[in-house]
C-alpha cells in the first residue's frame, strides 16, 4: 500500500507542477475568489474579504453532477469524507471532516440548522434530501460555534434550496434511470430510478416554488455476501420529497418568506455485521418521516439588515427488526421535535466595519417506544438560549478581521463561552492572500445521551479548539488558483460509553491535524481542471474510517457549444475499522484497503434552454472496495437522464 501512496503522491505533484487545472471546478468551484459567500458572517461578503477558504458548489457545478446524491457531491470536496455514499442507498452515512465525527458537523438548510433530536448524536441524515432540490452548497471548515452554536466543531455545510425564477410561471421536470450493481454483479436492467418536477414563478410582490421528488433503488444487499456462492436478498430504498416556498415583498425594505417540506424515506436493512454469516435479514424495515415549517422575514434599513430565521422540525423514525433470540420481529419508534429561532442584525458602523448581533433559541424533545424500554417526552427535553456578537472589519489595503463570541446558556448543564479570531491579509502588490484563525466550539449532549436508560444527566458538552493557517494565490489573471491550509484541532470532554453501560465525559485530549490543498487552472475556455489533496492525522482514539490521504481530480471539456464532458478520479487511503465478532464475542480491529474510483459524465443540450440529456458511468474500472467492514459497495454502473425546462 505504501507504493500506491507514493504513486498517488507523485501523480498529485505532477498535476501541481503542470498546473493543468480549472478555474471553476466541476468538483466544486472551490477557490473562486470573486464569488460571494455568507457562511462566515451570515451576510453576503465578497470572498476575497473572507478569512476562510470556503468551498462553493454552484448551480453550474451541480448541473455537471446530475444523477448524484448530496453525499457523493460533498465527498469530492477537499477535507471532506462522507462514508457510506458508495454503499447501498439505505446505508447510514458518516461525516468525517478534519478528524471529527458526524455530530461535529452542523448542516444548515437555507441558513437554518437541521438535526434529528431523537438521534444519539443529533446529526442530520443527508439521505432525506434530494440533490435536485439544491441550488448551491457552501462548506466552511473549522470550529464555528460563535456564529452557529452547537455541533459546528469541524465544519458547517450550508445548503441553499432552489428558489423561484423571474417569470410569472415556469416549470422543470426530470427523470433518470440506471443500473445498480456491485463489482461482482452485472445486471443490465434499470434498478435505480429518480424523477420529479417543480413549478415556480414571480408575480409582482409574490413569488413561489413547489417541487416533488421520488427516488427508488433495489438490486443489492446492504450486507456483503461472505463468498460468491451465496446470494443475499436485495434491500430496497425509496424516498419521496415535497417542498414549498412562498415569498412576499411587502416593500423595498421588508420581505416575508415561508417554507414547508415533507420527506419520507423507507428502506430494508440487514443486521449489523458480526462475522457470523447470519446478517442477511429480510424482516428488517425502517421508515423516517420529516416535516419542516419555517418563517423567515428580513428587514433592511439604512445602516443594516435584521433577519429572523425560525423553524419547526419534526422527525419520526420506526423500525421493524428481527430478534434472533426470540425469533420474533420487534417494533421501535422514535419521535422528536426541534424548534429554532435565530434573530440577528447586521449594523454597518462604517464602510469597513460591521457587527452582527444575535440571539438563538433552540428547544428539543423526544419520546420513544422500544422492546427494551420507553422514553417520555415530558421528561426528555432541554433548551438553549445563546446571545452572540461578531465583528467584521474589511479594508481597501488588504487587512480583514472576523472576531466574535457566543454565550451558550443550557437548561441542563449551565453556561459556557466560545469565541473566534480570524485575521487575513490580501496583498495588493502581488496575488497572495494569507489567513489564520483560532476558534472554539461545543457539541451539546443529545437527549438520548442525557435521558435514555443509558443516559447521564451530569454530562457536559464536548469542547473543541481549532487553529488554522494558510494562503491562497491567484496567477495569470486568476486562471491559476492555488491554496494550502493547515489545521490543528483538539477536543476535550469527549462523550463516550463506560463499562457500566452509561454515557460519560472522558478525561483527556484527543488531537487531529492535517493539510488541505487545492489547485485549479482554466487552460482555455473549453478545457478546465481541478485537483485537491487532503492529509489527515489523528490520535488513536479518533482513528476510525478516516483516510490519512485523499485525492480528488476532475477534468471538464466543452466538446461543443451544447456538449460537455467530465471525468473525475478519487483516491481514498486505507482506513481503520472495527466490528463486534459474534463468534468470539470481542471487538475485532481491521484495516480497510485503499481504493480508486474513476467516473465520467456526458451532457448534451438537445434543445437550447429547454431540454438537456445526460449519461454517467461510475466506478468505470469496476474496483471492488469496502467503505465499512462487512457491507457492500457499488461497482460499475450506468445512468441515463433528461431535464426539461418550460
Image (cartoon, helix red, strand yellow):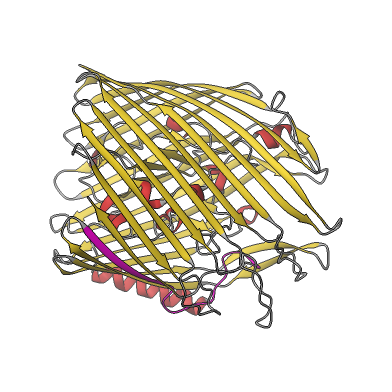
Point 66% across, 54% down: residue: 285
Tell me residue 282's x, y (percent). Answer: 70, 63
Point 45% across, 45% down: residue: 241
Q: Nearer the viewer, residue 393 or 187?
A: 187
Q: Nearer the viewer, residue 278 or 470?
A: 278
Q: Is residue 491 magenta?
A: no
Tell me residue 105's x, y (percent). Answer: 50, 44
Residue 279 against residue 541 in the figure, above or below:
below
Residue lying at the far right in this picture: please name it.
326
Q: On the picture, is 292 further left or further right than 60?
A: right
Residue 271 against residue 593 in the figure, above or below:
above
Q: Is residue 628 magenta?
A: yes
Q: Which image quadrant is residue 375 in? A: top right
Q: Is residue 445 visible?
A: no
Q: Nearer the viewer, residue 381 or 549?
A: 381
Q: On the picture, is 442 further left or further right than 584?
A: left
Q: Is residue 425 visible?
A: yes
Q: Nearer the viewer, residue 496 or 253?
A: 253
Tell me residue 494's x, y (percent). Answer: 65, 41
Count of all numbered marks drawn on residues in the image: 0
Q: Which image quadrant is residue 420 in? A: top left
Point 62% across, 67% down: residue: 631
Residue lying at the far top in this picture: please name it.
302
Residue 600 against residue 456 in the figure, above or below:
below
Residue 282 against residue 60 in the figure, above or below:
below
Which range of residues does the magenta coloring cover? 611-630
- Magenta stretch: helix, strand or loop mostly: loop
Tell me residue 52's x, y (percent). Answer: 34, 43
Amino acid at each position: 500500500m505504501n507504493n500506491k501512496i507514493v504513486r498517488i503522491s507523485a501523480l498529485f505533484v505532477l498535476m501541481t507542477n503542470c498546473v493543468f487545472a480549472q478555474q471553476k471546478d466541476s468538483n466544486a468551484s472551490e477557490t473562486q475568489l470573486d464569488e460571494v459567500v455568507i457562511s462566515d458572517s451570515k451576510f453576503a461578503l465578497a470572498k476575497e474579504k473572507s478569512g476562510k477558504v470556503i468551498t462553493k458548489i454552484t448551480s453550474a457545478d451541480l448541473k455537471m453532477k446530475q444523477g448524484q446524491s448530496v453525499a457523493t457531491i460533498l465527498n469530492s470536496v477537499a477535507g471532506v469524507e462522507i462514508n457510506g455514499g458508495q454503499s447501498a442507498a439505505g446505508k447510514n452515512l458518516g461525516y468525517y471532516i478534519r478528524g471529527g465525527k458526524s455530530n461535529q458537523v452542523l448542516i444548515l438548510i437555507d441558513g437554518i440548522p437541521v438535526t434529528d433530536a431523537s438521534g444519539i448524536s443529533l446529526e442530520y441524515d443527508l439521505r432525506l434530501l434530494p440533490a435536485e432540490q439544491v441550488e448551491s452548497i457552501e462548506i466552511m471548515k473549522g470550529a464555528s460555534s460563535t456564529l452557529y452554536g452547537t455541533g459546528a466543531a469541524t465544519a458547517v455545510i450550508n445548503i441553499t434550496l432552489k428558489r423561484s425564477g423571474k417569470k410569472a410561471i415556469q416549470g422543470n421536470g426530470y427523470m433518470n434511470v440506471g443500473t445498480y450493481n456491485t463489482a461482482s454483479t452485472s445486471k443490465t436492467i434499470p434498478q435505480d430510478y429518480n424523477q420529479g418536477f417543480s413549478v415556480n414563478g414571480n408575480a409582482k410582490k409574490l413569488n413561489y416554488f413547489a417541487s416533488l421528488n421520488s427516488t427508488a433503488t433495489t438490486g443489492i444487499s446492504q450486507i456483503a455476501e461472505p463468498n460468491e456462492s451465496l446470494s443475499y436478498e436485495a434491500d430496497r430504498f425509496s424516498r419521496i420529497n415535497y417542498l414549498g416556498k412562498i415569498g412576499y415583498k411587502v416593500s423595498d425594505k421588508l420581505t416575508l418568506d415561508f417554507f414547508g417540506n415533507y420527506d419520507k424515506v423507507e428502506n430494508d436493512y440487514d443486521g449489523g455485521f458480526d462475522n457470523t454469516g447470519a446478517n442477511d435479514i429480510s424482516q428488517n424495515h425502517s421508515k423516517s418521516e420529516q416535516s419542516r415549517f419555517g418563517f423567515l422575514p428580513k428587514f433592511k434599513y439604512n445602516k443594516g439588515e435584521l433577519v429572523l430565521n425560525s423553524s419547526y422540525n419534526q422527525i419520526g423514525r420506526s423500525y421493524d427488526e428481527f430478534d434472533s433470540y426470540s425469533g420474533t420481529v420487534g417494533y421501535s419508534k422514535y419521535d422528536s421535535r426541534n424548534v429554532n429561532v435565530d434573530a440577528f442584525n447586521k449594523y454597518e458602523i462604517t464602510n469597513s466595519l460591521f457587527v452582527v448581533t444575535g440571539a438563538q433559541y433552540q428547544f428539543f424533545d423526544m419520546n420513544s417506544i422500544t422492546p427494551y424500554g420507553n422514553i417520555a417526552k415530558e421528561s426528555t427535553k432541554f433548551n438553549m438560549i445563546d446571545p452572540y456578537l461578531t465583528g467584521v472589519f474589511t479594508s481597501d489595503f488588504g487587512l480583514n478581521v472576523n472576531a466574535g463570541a457566543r454565550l451558550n446558556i443550557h437548561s441542563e448543564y449551565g453556561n459556557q463561552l466560545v469565541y473566534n479570531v480570524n485575521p487575513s491579509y490580501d496583498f495588493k502588490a502581488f496575488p497572495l492572500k494569507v489567513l489564520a484563525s483560532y476558534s472554539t466550539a461545543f457539541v451539546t449532549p443529545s437527549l438520548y445521551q442525557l435521558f435514555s436508560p443509558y443516559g447521564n444527566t451530569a454530562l457536559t458538552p464536548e469542547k473543541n479548539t481549532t487553529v488554522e493557517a494558510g494562503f491562497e494565490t491567484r496567477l495569470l489573471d486568476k486562471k491559476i488558483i492555488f491554496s494550502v491550509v493547515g489545521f490543528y484541532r483538539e477536543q476535550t470532554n469527549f462523550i463516550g460509553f463506560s463499562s457500566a453501560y452509561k454515557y460519560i465525559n472522558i478525561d483527556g485530549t484527543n488531537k487531529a491535524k492535517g493539510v488541505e490543498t487545492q489547485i485549479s487552472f482554466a487552460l482555455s475556455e473549453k478545457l478546465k481542471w481541478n485537483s485537491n489533496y487532503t492529509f489527515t492525522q489523528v490520535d488513536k482514539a479518533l482513528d476510525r474510517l478516516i483516510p490519512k490521504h485523499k485525492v480528488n481530480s476532475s477534468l471538464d471539456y466543452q466538446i461543443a457549444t451544447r456538449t460537455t464532458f467530465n471525468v473525475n478520479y478519487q483516491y481514498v487511503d486505507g482506513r481503520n475499522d472495527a466490528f463486534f465478532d459474534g463468534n468470539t464475542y470481542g471487538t475485532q480491529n481491521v484495516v480497510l484497503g485503499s481504493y480508486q474510483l474513476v467516473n465520467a459524465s456526458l451532457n448534451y443540450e438537445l434543445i437550447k434552454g429547454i431540454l438537456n440529456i445526460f449519461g454517467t458511468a461510475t466506478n468505470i474500472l469496476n474496483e471492488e472496495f469496502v467503505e465499512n467492514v462487512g457491507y457492500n459497495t457499488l461497482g460499475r454502473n450506468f445512468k441515463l437522464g433528461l431535464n426539461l425546462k418550460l
